Amino acid sequence: MQSLINMRSFVFLLSLFSSSFAFAHGYKLGDLNIHHPWTRATPVGAEVAGGYMEITNSGSVDDRLISVDVSGVHMAEVHEMATVDGIMKMRPLPSGLEIKAGETIALKPGSFHIMMMGLSKPLIDGETVSGILHFEKAGSINIEFKIEAMGSEPAGQHNHATVPSN
């Protein structure tokens, strides 16, 4: 009986552990670690979406996310959302987003993000959309944005964004 309980506990813990791998994914480009690129599902007719992820620079040299390409999207830009004089404003970052050496930047709703404009079709929960991140020093890397349910926050999304200096 005790071995059956232990086996059930083991299977339960294994399922919890393995399900976190099913949702989180990451990429490495030189000293940059890109953790869990994701976006939200969109309704039919939506023309815009946001892309989110965390980028950690484990190196000794600052880098910069300078541009992004996303398949099925007319244009993608690196954006910042900030409150100015009590009003929430969004603006593109034409010189990109600095990722200082030894720091992590969180691209998340209400903050830095990838603005995807001109969607060619709805983004469907559970699917992925291909993208390419272009960095000033590290170069470019192909990624997949996991499409999550509308209104969702991804499991494991950390809240330790660093505000870069421009």
Image (spheres, rainbow, N blue to C red):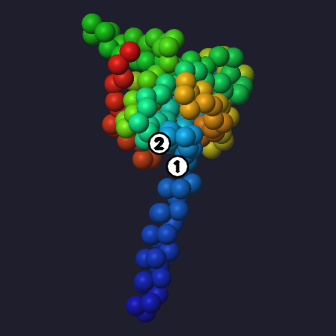
Q: Position of residue 163 (x, y in %)?
A: 34, 25
The type of residue carrying mark 1 is Ala
The reply, left or right, for residue 18 in relation to residue 112 is right
Q: Position of residue 105 (x, y in %)?
A: 41, 32
Decide which of tag 2 and tag 1 comes sooner along the chain.
Answer: 1
- The residue where tag 1 is placed is 24
Q: Position of residue 85 (x, y in %)?
A: 27, 7
Check the image and name the residue furthest to the front: 60
Q: Which mark is residue 59?
A: none
The type of residue carrying mark 2 is Pro
Residue 125 visible to an observer of this rendering? no
Asked which quadrant contains residue 162, the reply is top left
Q: Residues within 10 Å of mark 1 (few under 14, many from 20)?
A: some
Q: Residue at x 27, y 10 (%)?
A: 86
Q: Which mark is residue 154?
A: 2
Element carrying mark 1: loop
Front-most of residues 81 and 165: 165
Q: Quadrant of the N terminus?
A: bottom left
Asked which quadrant contains residue 149, the reply is top right
Q: Position of residue 65 (x, y in %)?
A: 52, 25
Q: Are marks 2 and 1 in contact (CB under 8 Å)?
A: yes
- Callout in the foreground (2, 1): 1
Asked which quadrant contains residue 37, the reply is top right
The reply, left or right, for residue 62 in relation to residue 162 is right
Q: Residues within 10 Å of mark 2 (few under 14, many from 20)?
A: many
Q: Is residue 16 above or below residue 153?
A: below
Q: Residue at x 43, y 18 (%)?
A: 80
Element carrying mark 2: loop
Q: Quadrant of the C terminus?
A: top left
Front-most of residues 68 and 123: 68
